[in-house]
Image (tube, rainbow, N blue to C red):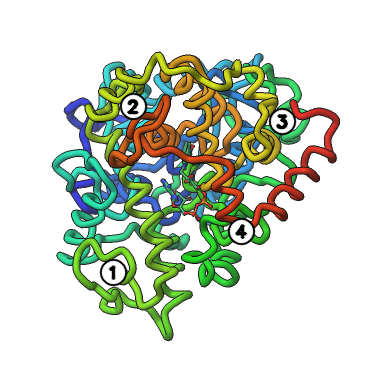
Amino acid sequence: MNEERIRNCNQKPMFPSGNYILYWMQAYRRFDSNHAFAYAVSLAKEQNKELIVYEGLRCDYPWNSERIHKFILEGMYDNQTRADELGINYWSFIESKSNPARGVLKEIAKNAVAIVTDDFPCFIIPEQINKLSEKINCPLIAVDSNSLLPLSRFERTASAARILRIWIHKEFLKGLPKFAKPKWKKEDLLGLHHQTKPPHGFGLPKDLNSFLLSLDFKEQVPPAKGVKGGRTEALKILKTFVTKKIQNYETGRSQPNPPEITATSGLSPYLHFGHIGIEEIFQSVLEATSQGKWNPERMSHQKPGDRDHFYSESSSTNHFLDELITWRDIGYLFFWKDKPNHINLEHLPDWVKANFRKHKSDTREYLYTLEQFESANTHDELWNAAQTELVKTGRMHNYMRMLWGKKVIEWTKTYEEAFSILEHLNNKYAYDGRNPNSYTGILWCFGLFDRPWFPERNVFGNVRFMSSDSTKKKFKMKSYLEYIGELSENSDSLFP
Ligand SMILES: Cc1cc2nc3c(=O)[nH]c(=O)nc-3n(C[C@H](O)[C@H](O)[C@H](O)COP(=O)(O)OP(=O)(O)OC[C@H]3O[C@@H](n4cnc5c(N)ncnc54)[C@H](O)[C@@H]3O)c2cc1C
């Protein structure tokens, strides 16, 4: 295990009279290709203790909905199956009205020698880690499985992707980072599964659909048709991507298209919930697009910062890996370094803030409320299409996401109101919401990681402007708009 990935959160000594090492699975919800699980296994072997994996699901997280709950639960059923195959003592706990979650983790922590968890830098997880670390008598060790490189390697957050790209490439040139064990075998885990049984109230519901109906969610968002969470589905999507789509990624990525024909992977929800890991995506993509078996020596290794040639001989693969690594990491690093509890526009660079001070009183040609935005009720056909896609499917094509964010800035009274509308809609409806990239994606629309653009515009000043007219000129929108039209027709109303 790479020491750079490990953070002892409370500096408490091991509790030797405890019965087990507890892996508290919070963000990277899988066993294979998971540094935190691998570390928990090594600790259990070293301490000669049982290993227990605890995966919980409460009802009270922000933006909770049937859509998100179902996706996570589907992942938990997959984890139960894999735990049974491997002989892992897997304790799932699903909160319900008659089965409250309060105090459960603290209770099972009492018998732990040490607790290992995922060091995810965003949403409710950092606070949950801090809270538990104060309440327990054993060490709480958070392990960074966020990306290919341990985030602690970077001294500071990057102000632009081109800068982080160079830093990352330089690190790769020093040597490929050590990957977590890609696939466990039962024999690797022998001796870790003993007799301890979970307390009363643990286990997965027998009938998922009727269980979901019994819960009261804050947000009324139903699961999207045809979307399934979990590792089995994630690996299927990865396979389709590497066999059918990756070759077109460079030229096709930005073209808004229905999910079956888009060149993008659709993996972000599975990455977000940890049903799949970045290391296995990296490896699969390189193997699929290299002639013959891929190995690290085959990385093309041009000069650091060369987006088109760095990882592979295939330009499309390089473009995909740049999104997967540079653009994804820039968001994670932003949270990792600053550890903000609450993100707002104060996190924008000074040049953007100066522009907003100058343009805050500019006249807005259109103004919409949250309700009008949410029900896709603006004058703009493309914007409404993007919002409909989000509501109905829990995803939004990346190019449309940029346009969607820019237009909300243009059509609200204040920049702050625009931010809070975007945060709410993205995190309420998107499967991949509540992620570092949700916030940095939205803040990118406000100028984060970007440069000043000219000419200076109304409302935006020198922040990059995007328009629906130029999107229509740039891309063939027919098949995307037809797909959205069908989504709307196939349901009674836009609201779920
Ligand atoms: C306003 C706005 C909001 C966004 N909200 C989110 C969000 O809530 N969650 C989220 O994961 N991403 C978000 N993004 C970034 C990006 O749009 C999505 O990651 C991408 O569209 C996911 O689709 P995909 O998995 O098919 O990506 P692919 O193109 O197949 O890329 C593979 C992976 O690389 C990463 N990636 C790709 N593009 C970006 C990008 N521009 N920035 C960061 N990472 C990227 C993602 O992890 C993605 O799954 C947002 C962008 C904007 C402009």
The residue at 71%/27% (across/down) is 212
SS of the residue at dot 4? loop
Out of 242 and 131, give the one closest to the viewer.
242
Label whose residue precedes the other's in the sequence (3 or 2): 2
Q: CA distance from mark 2 to mark 1?
A: 34 Å
Name the residue carrying label 3: 222
Q: CA distance from mark 3 to mark 2?
A: 28 Å
SS of the residue at dot 3? loop
Q: Relative to 11, is 170 above or below?
A: below
Neighbour class for label 3 at 10 Å: few (<14), some, many (≥20)?
Answer: some
Q: Quadrant of residue 377?
A: top right
Name the residue carrying label 4: 262
Q: Amino acid at mark 3?
A: Pro
Name the residue carrying label 1: 310
Residue 277 position, x and y percent, is 43, 53
Q: Relative to 176, is 136 above or below?
A: above
The residue at 33%/40% (across/down) is 454
Label whose residue precedes the other's in the sequence (2 or 1): 2
Q: Amino acid at mark 4?
A: Thr
